[in-house]
Image (cartoon, rainbow, N blue to C red):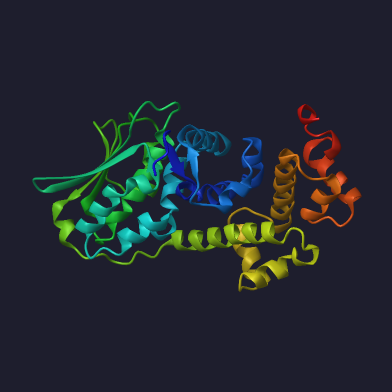
Amino acid sequence: MLNSAPSIKIRSFLQVAPYLARRGVSPIEFFQRLGISPNIFQDPDAWLPRVLCFHVANEMVAATQDRFGGAHVGNMTELRSLGMWGKSILKSADVAHACEVAAANASMLHQGSSVRLITEGRTARIVYRFTGRCEMDPRQFIYGSLAVLRKVPLMAGEPSAIRVHLAAPRARGDDALEECLGPNIEMGAAHDMIEFDRALLDMPLQNQVDEASKVTESLRSTVGAAGLLVERLSHHRQLKLKAIAKGMGMSARTLQRRLKYCGVDFEDLLDETRRGEALRLIYEGEHKMTEIAYRVGYSDPAHFTRAFKRWTGTAPSRFPGDLQ
């Protein structure tokens, strides 16, 4: 069922974390600063309001000083990481069917956007736009979406036959977009779209193996580790890196390497998981502090109180004041 307000599925921008890490920005600190718990990424198929997603994208650009950050995030996104939308595309026999699937099922990822496949003469176009009024500048999501959509005809193996049209006006430094969108870019266009030679539609799909595959594996492991930590919080002895890695069927070294690729330190992830769960339980208003301490992995309530003061600046019994 579609949400009443325009929304975007979380898995559409999971790659924000490794992108931030590459730019020297801590993903956990970044989302904390925006008032968003990284725990929301444990459910990549959940929906977030479009306006919040635009806000995250614009703050990401401000934090990294990279005005094409959205394009880089899209370039790091592998089709198979995009759930049923991406998997359906990859099952297609040829580029024509892949493009049709991509356009017809856009609402699987973006509710409040439109993707149309138009064939005319010797060209085919994938036209992308947001519907309704955009409360914030959507440019970064447009860059990212076109970087992803470009990967569909790119599976024909003919990158020179693909062109990207952007409605954004030309500005100094636009050449940097070529890294993510290829060399054939037109700025100040009538529509945001991918245009390519119609002959590509009849070509079979070719497997594209690039660095995005590494991003997908690292993100999957990070999300899995976060979810397992939540499940095991009350089991104090099962919260070590080695135990979590074993529960995921990999070595501690592999898990640590994948977390690092996403800019996440295991101890920081554990600490943030405890913080998020503790706040959730307090807001429920149905649990004693000693019970909350135990449920988030502290056998000694005094240790929990010290951690909570570090998280919030106040004791758990005094937080939040308006609930007392």
Where is residue 227? Give x, y as percent: 62, 58
Relative height, residue 199 to residue 132 (above, below): below
Q: Quadrant of the N terminus?
A: top left
In the rendered image, is residue 315 in sight? no
Q: Quadrant of the C terminus?
A: top right
Where is residue 52? Give x, y as percent: 51, 34
- Horizontal placement of 267 versus 134: left or right? right
In the rendered image, is residue 9 in sight? yes
Foreground of the two, 301 or 260: 301
| Residue under the point 17% across and 47% down | 124
- Residue at the left extreme, as displayed: 121
- Horizontal placement of 261 versus 113: left or right? right
Relative height, residue 1 to residue 243 (above, below): above
Relative height, residue 125 to residue 67 (above, below): below
Picture quadrant where residue 281 is located: top right
Foreground of the two, 161 or 130: 130
Picture quadrant where residue 310 is located: top right
| Residue under the point 85% across and 37% down | 317
Where is residue 82? Give x, y as percent: 42, 55
For the image, the number of numbered tags is 0
| Residue under the point 57% across and 46% down | 20
- Horizontal placement of 29 versus 145: left or right? right
